Amino acid sequence: MYDALLAETTTISGAEGDSIEAYLARTMTAGPVGGVVVIHHLPGYDAATKGIVRRFADAGYNAIMPNLFHREAPGAAPDDAYATVRAQGGVPDDRVVADVAAARDYLRSLTNSNGKVGVIGFCSGGRQTYLVACSIEIDAAVDCYGGFVLNSPPAGSGLNMTPVIELTPNLSCPLLGLFGEEDKAPSPEETAKIAAELDKHGKHYEFHTYPDAGHGFFATDRPMYRPAAATEGWATLLEFYGRHLSGKES
């Protein structure tokens, strides 16, 4: 089996035509293959999340991660970019949606694309995944412990995020949610309420909650990493994408 991949920093035309940095990893097979837009967590466009992009390419997808902090801190180290964006309360939702739409279109334009594109996000990126999937056409969405889908951030957090649960009627695709039983944002009680809202509107979704895992259990470079939950979560999300991103463009 041919398993070569290409990974590199590139530039895409994001919201309002802005040129923004993005990290691309693509399988070198002839295809046709599906694509995945990776939305990084609030700590930023970092080495660990670039590793996730490469993992999708290794699994046979084209994947890209737009740097959502590029405008605020071009060329800055991830920690510095995070501090700058955090001080501003985060990045605007409408800009995130437009940047992800641009990344989706970039993947669709690749010569080995089958036209199917999914989105995945972690932490704040999980909330943004829910937002994106309810705002533009996407073929499959994976929310990894996205906080503040249902509730606003606590007072004093400095974050300007607002709940996106009211957008649920507009969800454009199947949704997979991967959560930790010990998480506080979102807690199991919150994810149950989100599930109820999805049921209310007849949406296709799957939620999995892992024991002995809290927020950030996929993060291999952080103390909250939980190998058992992460291993099972990867198997689940790759199977999910395999069902929803493998078809040819119609």
Image (spheres, grey):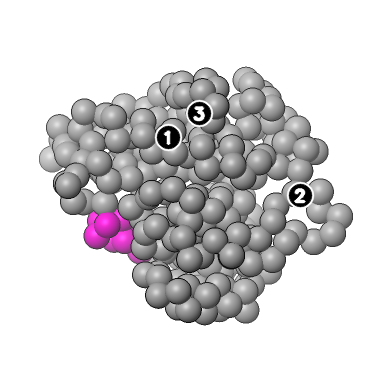
Q: Residue at the spot x=36%, y=62% of the render?
A: 174
Q: Residue at the spot x=40%, y=24% of the render?
A: 8
Task: Kindly identify which numbered label has been placed on residue 34.
Answer: none
Residue of label 1:
103
Secondary structure under tag 2 reads loop
Q: In which quarter of the image is the N terminus?
A: top left
Whether tag 3 and tag 2 are in contact, CB under 8 A, the answer is: no
Which stretch appears magenta? 235-244
Of labels 3 and 2, earlier in sequence is: 3
Of labels 1 and 3, earlier in sequence is: 3
Q: Residue at the spot x=69%, y=66% of the render?
A: 151
Secondary structure under tag 3 reads loop
Residue of label 2:
159
Of discs 3 and 2, which sits in the foreground?
A: 3
Whether tag 1 and tag 2 are in contact, CB under 8 A, the answer is: no
Of labels 1 and 2, earlier in sequence is: 1
The majority secondary structure of the magenta stretch comes to helix
Left or right of 52? Residue 180 is right
- Magenta includes 243? yes
Residue 157 in the image, given as x and y percentages of width and height: 81, 53
- Magenta includes 51? no
Q: Residue at the spot x=29%, y=61% of the render?
A: 239
Residue of label 3:
14
Left or right of 169? Residue 237 is left
Answer above or below: position of 96 versus 242.
Answer: above
